[in-house]
Amino acid sequence: MKAGFIAVVGRPNVGKSTLTNKLVSEKVAIVSDKAGTTRDSIKGILNHGGNQYIFIDTPGIHKPKHLLGEHMTSVAIQTLKEVEVILFVLDGSQEISTGDQFVMERIEEARNTPRVLVINKIDKMSDEAMEAKRAEIEEKLGKFDGVVELSAEYALGLPKLLTALDPYLEEGMMYYPEDMYTDMPMYKIITETVREKLLHKTRDEIPHSIAVEIVDVVRRPNGKDRYDINIYVERSSQKGIVIGQNGKVLKEVGIEARRDIEEILGKKIYMNLWVKVKEKWRKKKPFLKEMGYHLDED
Ligand SMILES: Nc1nc2c(ncn2[C@@H]2O[C@H](COP(=O)(O)OP(=O)(O)OP(=O)(O)O)[C@@H](O)[C@H]2O)c(=O)[nH]1
Ligand SMILES: [Mg+2]
């Protein structure tokens, strides 16, 4: 029996959460095409071939512009120090950027922790592009203990990744029971599901300005509980966009989120969504704490 913690890190939008979900064959982390989707570390646990792989999906590492961004980058950097092996994910279909190099510098600071590179999104790359990419990596990022080319979206190359990680797991006991695939509490799965649907339907600054909170759960005799959920935005102009004309956007978000949540809970629910304005909440520490965005030592 071998087990180990694996940090999944990289700049925003490279496919870290998609990869984590595909590895554990469950949706533990929400995914969107907007950079900055993941805001906290999320464990995805896989038991395979007698091994327990504990993947820690992290927020994309970037240069923060506000307190929430600072929290996100610190969560990821903190995770680097707590694992057996680091999985550095990059988007192979894009040029290696200063963003990737910034992540590499943070990884270097974790000193002796082994590092495996994932070149993701190979479904968007030709063979020639891959050849060029290997050279570019060596030049701009240096050497890794292992390199795996894969497509998280299409679940191509995942067994190779597990094989590459195997040597870094440690003999001993399992950390988590066999049927546990995430450490996400149910309320977080619910708020994240609502946030994901909102991310899919908004753009520009709005996805970044959204926070979601369950304010009440009312148990009902018919077993169909009612969830009252607040959606926070930073300005009143954003409120109108999130609600949409005649409430269209909010209604669609409600329908899609409820469908997913009912599947996860295995039962029907009622859901009320309210949109509220909290000026500049991403810069306010007490509100961030209330939303659960804080490190242990904060
Ligand atoms: N074509 C292609 N798209 C992918 C692949 N993996 C992820 N994506 C897409 O890339 C986008 C970002 O994916 P995420 O998994 O949310 O990326 P992330 O690295 O977790 O992003 P942050 O949480 O913002 O740091 C989404 O639109 C995914 O569908 C892949 O292998 N191929
Ligand atoms: Mg993510």
Image (cartoon, grey):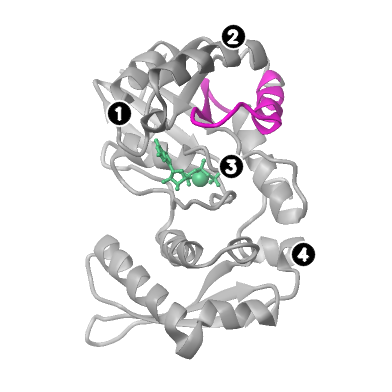
Residue beneath disc 4: 284
Regarding mark 2 in the picture, which secondary structure is present there?
A: loop
| x and y, in percent, of residue 84 in the image | 51, 20
Picture disc at residue 12 = 3
Question: Which callout, 4 or 1, points at the residue further toward the start of the chain?
Answer: 1
For marks 4 and 1, give the CA distance. 41 Å
| Number of marks | 4
Sequence-wise, the earlier of marks 2 and 1 is 2
Q: What element carries label 4?
A: loop
Q: How far apart are marks 3 and 2 (CA)?
A: 22 Å
Instruction: Depth check: give the residue in front, 270 or 143.
Output: 143
* Residue that label 1 marks: 156
Residue at the extreme bottom: 246
| Amino acid type, label 3 | Pro
Residue at x 56%, y 32% (from the top left corner):
9
The local crowd at label 3, few if under 14, some if 14 to 19, many if 20 or more residues have their Cα within 10 Å, is: many
What segment carries the magenta color? 82-108
Q: Is residue 217 visible?
A: no
Mark 2 closeness class: few <14, some 14–19, many ≥20 residues within 10 Å: few
From this view, report whether residue 63 is shown above or below residue 100.
below
Kindly indicate the quadrant of the structure image that contains residue 152.
top left
Q: What residue type is labelled 2?
A: Lys
